[in-house]
Image (cartoon, rainbow, N blue to C red):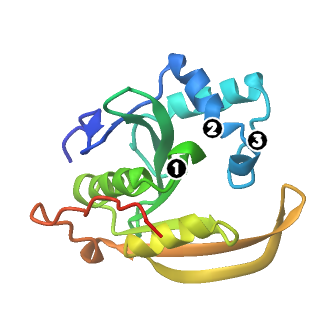
Amino acid sequence: MSSLSLPIETDRLILRTFERSDIDGLGAYHALPSVQRYVFTRTRDTSEVAGALNTMRSHVSLQRPGDTLTLAMVRKGDKVLIGHVSLHWSDATAGQGEVRFCINPAYAGQGFSREALSAVYDLAFDHYRIHRVFARCDGRNHHSIKLMQQMGMRLEAHYREHALFQGEWDEELHFAILDREWQRSSKVKDLPVRHRVA
């Protein structure tokens, strides 16, 4: 496997590792209550956001199972940090990886998460030779559920009230896609996002 060349550029995004200067951009979305209900790490104040940023800054490569690569999603035009996407190498023997993503709600619904995930799937399957990528999703997060389906992932499990998460019973969905199912062709381009008139 060749060394990973960062940043990764898509049509509208730059995917790069996190920097110390990203604290305000990360805090702008990560500490929002609408985001907090879906993330693993609580970040309610500046010190907790700083802790989350330090963790993300350490996620810079996949060398062995258990490693995570976390990339900031930065818009090309104005260089605004709008979210992040991660690839976690969960099992080397079975070739398993997990994707995680989070976007500032102000930029949701514009295709940015799909664009970032497409690049990470390419990275997982083509660069790291991962066999199966899965994603976990809260059962109440209808936007993420729809995105996973649009990405070609299949629903493999629905865990009902399987754990207490932030004081509530958690409904967790597991989606997955195999390397042979992700055949992105350079000839196929995503259609532009259309805004509904009615």
Q: Does label 1 or label 2 sit earlier along the sequence?
A: 2
Please tell me the numbered disc located at residue 29: 2
Q: Amino acid at mark 3?
A: Arg
> In which quarter of the view is residue 160 placed?
bottom right
Indicate whether 41 appears above or below 124: above
Q: Amino acid at mark 2?
A: Tyr
> In which quarter of the view is residue 196 placed?
bottom left
Left or right for 133, reference 156: left
Please tell me the numbered disc located at residue 66: 1
The residue shown at (51%, 74%) is: 175
The residue shown at (27%, 57%) is: 122
Left or right for 164, reference 159: right
The residue shown at (27%, 71%) is: 182
Indicate whether 60 appears above or below 130: above
Q: Does label 3 or label 1 sit earlier along the sequence?
A: 3
Check disc 1: other Cα within 10 Å, few if <14, some if 14-19, many if 20+.
few
The residue under label 3 is 42
Q: Does residue 40 appear in the picture of this structure?
A: no
At which x and y percent is residue 39? 68, 50
Of circles 1 and 2, the one toward us is: 2
| Local secondary structure at mark 1 | loop
Label 2 vs label 3: CA separation?
A: 12 Å
| Local secondary structure at mark 3 | loop
**Residue furthest to the front:** 198
Q: Amino acid at mark 1?
A: Gly
At which x and y percent is residue 1? 21, 48
Left or right for 144, reference 138: left
At which x and y percent is residue 116? 37, 50
Q: Does label 2 or label 3 sit earlier along the sequence?
A: 2
At which x and y percent is residue 164? 85, 64
Of circles 3 and 1, the one toward us is: 3
